[in-house]
Structure formats: C-alpha cells, structure tokens
Image (cartoon, rainbow, N blue to C red):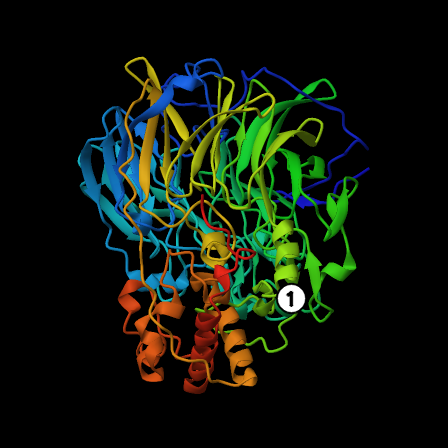
Amino acid sequence: MKLRTRALAKVTILFSLPLLPLLSYSNSSSSEPQKQMNAGTEWRKHGGGDAEQRFSPLNQITPKTIADLGLSWSFDLGVSRGIEATPLVIDGIIYITATWNKVFALDAKSGALKWQFDPQVDRSKGADLCCDAVNRGVAYSDGKIIMGTIDGRLIALDAKTGAKSWDVITVDQSKPYTITGAPRVVKNKVIIGNGGAEYGVRGYVSAYNISNGSMLWRFYTVPGNPADGFENPAMTKAATTWTGEWWKFGGGGTVWDSIAYDPELDLLYIGVGNGSPWNHSIRSPKGGDNLYLSSIVALRPDTGEYVWHYQTTPGESWDYTATQHMILADLEIEGKTRKVIMQAPKNGFFYVIDRSSGELLSANNYVPVNWASHIDLSTGRPVENPKARYGNNAPHTTFPGPFGGHNWHPMAFSKDTGLVYIPALETPFTYSHDEQFNYTQGYWNTGADMTMTSLPTDKAKFKAIKAMLKGRLLAWDPVKQQAAWKVEHNGPWNGGVLATAGGVVFQGNADAKLVAYRADNGERLWDFFAQTGIVAPPISYELGGEQYIAVASGWGGTFALLYGGLLPQESTAGVGRLMVFKLGGKAKLPALPDSVSQKPTPPKSTADDVTIANGSKIYDNRCAVCHGDHSISSGLVPDLRWTPYLSSLEAMELVVLKGILNARGMPSFNNVISKQDLNDLRAYIISNANKALEKGAELKPQPK
C-alpha cells in the first residue's frame, strides 16, 4: 500500500506501509535526541530536552518516599490570571513567567528573588488574545533568557542580571498577531511562531540570531496572495490545495506552541494551527486540503527549508490544530528501531509518525470521536463523517469540539514505562454555519455560529451536557495504540504532566491540587491543595543532593474564561504562585483571604424578548470568550452583571464603543457593535443579572 505523496524540498517520495504494523517499545535510547539537562539535575529546555519528553531521570521521589513530600517554598507572582509557563532551572536559578510576560529569576533552593523584568506589554493587545493573557515560558542559551511577548516581540535578557540584551519585533504590529508560546533555541537560532488565526492572520515561524536578534529565515505555513508570488516551492505546492480568495482572510496556520528538534537528523518540527476562518466552506469554498494547516512540518533549522509534512486534518473546519505537544522517541516496529514523533492533536487521534520521513506508522482515537471513523493507513487520511462538515449544511454536534481531545497542556513520555501521559478532554461542540458571516480583521472570524457555544439554562439539559464534559489523565501505550490506564477528573482543563524515573507522574488539576500518581498503574499517591487551579506543567531538578518538584499555579485560559463561572470546579481565580516541593518540606502557603463581596442590585430587566435575544447573539459572538457564558465570569475578568458601567447605556458606551479601558485590555468594539446593538447587549446582561443562574445548585455546586 502507498501513503499519500509528500513533497520534499525538490523531490516527491512515496513511502510503503504495511497493513497493520506490529509495534513494540524499546528501552534503548542511545540514538535518541534526549539531551536531557545536566545529568538530570537541571531543567534547561522547555520540554526538558530537544525531544520534549518531559521526563526527569531523578528518582529520590518514589511511591515509597512520596508521603514525605512537602512544600519547600513558594513565590507570589502577584497576578490572578492564568499561568501556563514551564519554569527553567539553570545554575541554581529558576526562571518563571507570569501574566503579561513578566519574568522572575529566583534562587532555586530558597525562592529568594534575584531579579525581575517587565517588558511593559501594551495591554490593549489583550483584544487580540483568543485565550487569556498567558504565555508558556522562556528559553535559555548563550547566557541569555529569551521570551516572546504578547505584543509580538522577542526579547533577550542577561540570565544573571536581567538586563536587556536585545528586543526585536517579530510581527506586523498593525495586525492582530500575538505570541503566547515559548521560544526554542536550536543551533544558536531562536525559533518563534505566533498566534492570531481566529482574528485573520497568516501564520509563520521565524529564526533569529541569538547574539543580536537579527532574523535569519522565515517559513510561512500557508500561501499568500498568488499575485505577490510564492516564497518557495513549498508555498507553490500548498497553493494548489486552496480555492477562492483565502488570503483575504489571512488563512491562519499559526505556529503558536509546539516545536521539537532532532539533532541527529537535523530536523526542526513545528506544529501548525487551524484555518482562518474555521469554516472550510468559507475559507476555501471549492474544497481542498489547505496545506499546511493542522500539520506537523519538518524543516531544516539552518535555512527554514521544507523537508516533509503530515497533515492530521485535511480541509480543517473545526479548529483542529496540530500545535499540540510533539514528543520524539525511539520505538520498535516489527523488530526494527524507528525514530518517531508522537502527537495527540485536537482532532482526537493519537499519531505515531516516522520523524525522518513523515511516514504514518499508526493512528487511533484516544478520546471519543465522531467527525471521522478512523485514519486510513493506506492513505494516511481520516475517513470523515460527511455530516460533520457543517458549512452550508445542518448543524452537527461533534466530538471533539474546538477545545479538542487534548489542548496545549503538555504530555509526558516515560522511558521506563513506555507510556505517554495525556491531559485528555471530552468537550463536544455543536458547529453551525454562520449565515451572517462578515470578515472583520481584528475580531473573531470563525465562520461558525458562536451562539452554539452557550450552555442551555434548562436544568435538565444543562445536567445532560455537563455530564458530557470530561477530563482525565490518560496513560497511552503508543505501541499498542490503546489506553494502559486512566484517572477521571471532575471536569476538563487540567494541567500539563511530568514523568520521573522514580516511577511517579505529576499533574495539577482544575480542582486546585497538584497530584502524584504511580506511573505504571495510575494509583493516586499524594496531593497538595494549591488554593487555585493548576494548568501549567511541573518540572523536576536537583540541588545539594535533593530532588525538587516545581509547578506554577494560576487558574485561567480559554476554557476557564468561557465556562469557568458555570461549571463546577474547586478552583477559583486566585494569586498565581510558583510552588516548589521536596522530601521533608514543611512550608505552608499564605492563608486565603476572606472573599466576601456584596453584589450591587442590578437595574430591573424591562426589555422585550426580541431585544434580549439579539443581545444574547451579540454577546455570544463578541463577549463570551472573555467574560463567560451567560455573562457569568470565572473571576479572571470582570463579571459584567455586576459592573457599575451597567448602570446606564451612556456608561457602557464609554467602555464598549469609546474604549476608555483600552489600556487594561478592554478594546473598543465600535467597528462591529452599533449603539442599538449595545442597547440590546446591555438588556441581555441585565436579564442575566436578575436571573443569577449560577446560584442554582444544579448549575454551580459550591466549592468544597
């Protein structure tokens, strides 16, 4: 059988595939690009090493010793929004980032502050963020700490002092680009992508000289306007898979998170995101695969030259990004060692791919999936359910939804167990064609009717849908393509994962706990109450002969913004912290302050049903992604039902149309919301304020 054709730089190669490859795991790692820390004592790279395995070889903390694990120290980051950063540990200093790209350098043993740096990000760029004012951390090399900023800059700091070495702009700042991903450093080149596909941008990844910040190369992931010519043969080929005038919508394909590198093959791997708009029938009306959306792409790190790609979701229409964590490892296939890259992207299938050639070796769904029945190994393509393509068709409730079967939260791979540990989700979504779609750069442009995001207020229907929203820690055998064990959480949006040689797996969760599990069977061994949810991944390092576990707490991100106010969590918005644990640790977190807030009496709801219904549609399409479903905030941003600006239409006009809070991240919407629309929007919010939906026990159980 033949896998579908993939073009290399100037050559087309066909790969042969067996029908059902028999896989087995090998402990041999002599040829793997591990490059793990200094003998395992530090955490110098984002994923622990170039292979991004997030496996620590430290083994003091085991199922037998973990009962003695306790807090060694904590550091208050001074923010109450989502913290997604992976800390780095180099030469006894731990580096962590907080909201709005603030960087802290701390003594890794005591937590004493060495220095801090605030890049003074333009807060108005918050309007261009799909998913909270977050970032995933920094990179280190050549004595420098390097970070990407929300406003599209790349900044290098002296690792010892925090002094700025250089500061360059990586995007056209007149467009709604942002950076939330952590940079990677490969061969003295800083690799960075960007985000903004929902807002209408063209994605790319760039390499910069670590010495002075000069740009060395740029690879676009989707083709631009054909009238301008194409940058390279890869873009010429990609353009044949698009139709219509896609470039007017930007096209999407942003490289906003996962990057990995194999030094032996000298290949750089990037994960490419969704289309702009989501809706394939609008973006590319006559069909087409739309390369290189939702693809893993291999490049030469010296030049950015295209080598191969594998597209997980041809003709992407569901926000099924392939930006999710990629892991490099060696697996045994029919008795032969194969260098593989593994990914569990949003679309719900787990892929094992030969990382030297792009050949698909195996794929299976790791969560329930109904947009496709399976991946056809003879073609490498999904066998789709035609009803799932909602463009110009009936609405379709699809598994997974846009949050995916796995989102940005990093997985981990244990060399000892051979398992991949996935922070998995089940979050269905009803996709529906937006009949009134009108592209507006700088605002959400999905082409899907976002009123479908709103959960029903009928209690019976709400209960049924709530029962469908799930989260779990899933131990996946990439050899057998099946689950080895799983641990169910109370809901979705739990943290990234760390695996260790001590036979322990660590994960934070939405219920404000850091939890340790046995790596071989998932037995819960230990937990620690963090006071606020943990979405960031833990790391491990060693100092003075002692093993430490570090993780940042800080509930937030896109799911928390949209549904955090309605769905049950033991977590609430709170102060983000870096917490560091060791055996024998006796420290305690500061006590939570009493949180007693008296809500103001809202204006009476006097508007008619038509007005409120129109306000609801405006809210769902323009406001819900930040301020929460049914205008019930998770606490990360203001709850609009209780804002003093609700008191009059004139007061709301100052904020929504005139932008008086622009500097705080609340932009003007005067390009897309009229004064009449604002009147209806206000009426809808007032109606919700008088209902107080979350007070019903069925809708919002009280935290324990």
Question: Residue 316's image quarter?
Answer: bottom right
In terms of secondary structure, where does tag 1 sit? Answer: loop
Please give left or right for residue 336 compared with residue 258 in the image: right
Q: Quadrant of the N terminus?
A: top right
Q: Which amino acid, by three-letter code, is at mark 1?
A: Ser
Please give left or right for residue 227 compared with residue 400 in the image: left
At x 76% / y 25%, what residue is drawn?
22
Q: Position of residue 437 (x, y in %)?
A: 58, 75
Can residue 591 be seen from the camera position used here? Answer: yes
Q: Please state which of residues 668 and 15 is positioned toward the viewer in this rendering.
A: 668
Q: Position of residue 174 (x, y in %)?
A: 36, 67
At x 52% / y 70%, what residue is drawn?
621
Above or below: residue 546 compared with residue 72? above
Q: Badge 1: how crowded within 10 Å, few (<14), some, or many (20+)?
A: many
Can residue 212 be seen from the camera position used here? Answer: no
Please give left or right for residue 476 compared with residue 623 in the image: right
Above or below: residue 445 compared with residue 636? below
Q: Please state which of residues 96 and 632 is positioned toward the viewer in this rendering.
A: 632
Question: What residue does disc 1 label?
Answer: 284
Q: Please state which of residues 534 and 287 is positioned toward the viewer in this rendering.
A: 534
Question: Residue 121's image quarter?
Answer: bottom left
Above or below: residue 197 compared with residue 28? below
Q: Position of residue 337 (x, y in %)?
A: 65, 20
Q: Quadrant of the C terminus?
A: top left
Instruction: Tell how many labels.
Output: 1
Q: Position of residue 529 (x, y in %)?
A: 40, 35
